[in-house]
Amino acid sequence: MMGPEKNKIPDGVRRIHLIAVCGTGMGALACMLKEMGFEVTGSDQKVYPPMSRFLKEKGISITEGFSEKNLAYGPDLVVVGNAVTKNNPEAVKMQDMGLYYCSMPQALNRFVASGKQTLLVSGTHGKTTTAALVSWILYKAGLDPSFFIGGILNNFQSNYRLGNGQFLVIEGDEYDTAYFNKVPKLMHYHPHITVLTSIEYDHADIYRDMNQVIDAFEGFLSRLSSDSILFAYDGDKTIDAVVANKRCRVIKYGKGKSSFWTLSNTAIHVPWTSFEAFKKGKIFGQFKTTLLGEHNLLNTLSAIAMADQIKIPGKIIGAAIETFQGVKRRQEIRGTKRGITVMDDFAHHPTAVRETIWAVKPLTSNGRLIAVFEPRTHASMRKVFQKIYPASFEGADLICVREPPMLFKVPPEERFSSQKLVDDLNQRGKDAHYFSNTDAIIDFLITQARSGDLILIMSNGGFDNIHERLLAAL
């Protein structure tokens, strides 16, 4: 069996195989590599639409199931997804054959980021929306950007783009890179400009506690050179501590009066939210966006700061913000039936749940906000947030909580209890209900929802296609 020296990318690569190709990031990478002229194959345990169809349309050969036969043709390089274990039959065969291999971030760095200036968005919350908005601003400015983002941008109907311009926008994830490289993905990038939105405890499957999360960001920021610029949110004490004494130039943004970039004079006129952005205490411009919530205004402010840093005029920034159509699964309205609106959102962390609920609250002037929550991430299925979640639902009028669908993956003593969350919410005076499955939620909602209500469905997964099924039932 070959040693770890094969964890590198050789020269002259032509044929590339991706293990676990149907993940959002791996699928996007496969498409980028194909567009760059490489011969690309891939495999995955579960090959199903829309990613399977999307990859086949791009001419990428996909095999269902992991098998050493998938490597029989001898690819020049194997890209290993972070969901792949060292016992995966293709990972074992890859080592036995002495093939060169790398992680997704390594491949992106080598084949896409090379020769470009990387604009990176990092932090626990807001990465996808902020990176998407930055990409759209660059595109509208005629800078022909490339981007690699963890959500589908509605303006492009894609989560990736290969442009000929000098800028590459990346969503910098703090999750593990690969089984052979247990460091945060963002450690692989060398950004020209970085945004840091927030630092909170998350990813309980890989981070033991908040200190480990802080160490991860500390390690990343310590690598930034003196030529690098960091836009750091000013309302997070953890960020204040982490950015201290770093070599990079730190520029604060947020609501602090002394910050370089600040927000002011916000007003909501559904569907628009207007605000003013100030730079060094002087008004930079007036803007309006269809994004909802203060957290999204702060995301937008960081995007403005990043765009201004690369000399994009304020008028172009403003026009881009107005025409930005958001990201799928972020406050995405899936449909309206009988006057009842069904909205999909990726929220799962307690902070994201709280901010999303308050953000969409202005849309419910003629009805109620019904929050439907499925805890299914590694962190939300654990009891680490058990005492925190109840306060997150304060803005909801009616709350439906599902039993976590894969709770067997968590040791019994560490498991989150949806029933306890519902009990705690009811003790706080909220109208909350527990459900063991998705069918029961749909049955409940078709009898309880009425015209004017907004049903906000929050999950980082497919949630048994509840959105379409509920709309059909209504």
Image (spheres, rainbow, N blue to C red):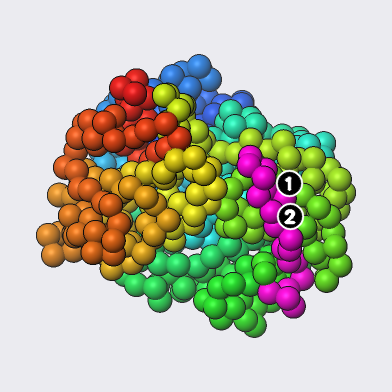
Q: Could you say whether the residue bearing mark 2 is in a helix, strand or loop?
A: strand
For this rendering, which residue is in front, 400 or 213? 400
Q: CA distance from mark 2 to mark 1?
A: 6 Å
Identified at 42% across, 49% down, the residue is: 347
**Residue 113 on image: x %, y %:** 65, 46
Query: What residue lies at 41% left-to-right and 43% top-to-bottom?
Result: 368
Magenta stretch holds residue 54: no
Furthest residue in direction front, as rendered: 366
The residue pinned by badge 1 equals 288
Q: Residue at image x 29%, y 29%?
A: 446
Q: Which residues are magenta?
A: 256-275
Residue drawn 62% across and 68% down? 233
Query: What main secondary structure does the magenta stretch of the protein show?
Result: strand
Q: Nearer the viewer, residue 19 or 138?
A: 138
Residue 248 in view (yes/no)? no
Image-based side of 212 in relation to 268, left or right: left
Q: Is residue 275 left or right of residue 461?
A: right
What residue sits right under mark 2 in the picture? 275
Question: With respect to residue 436, does 335 lie above or below?
Answer: above
266 in magenta: yes
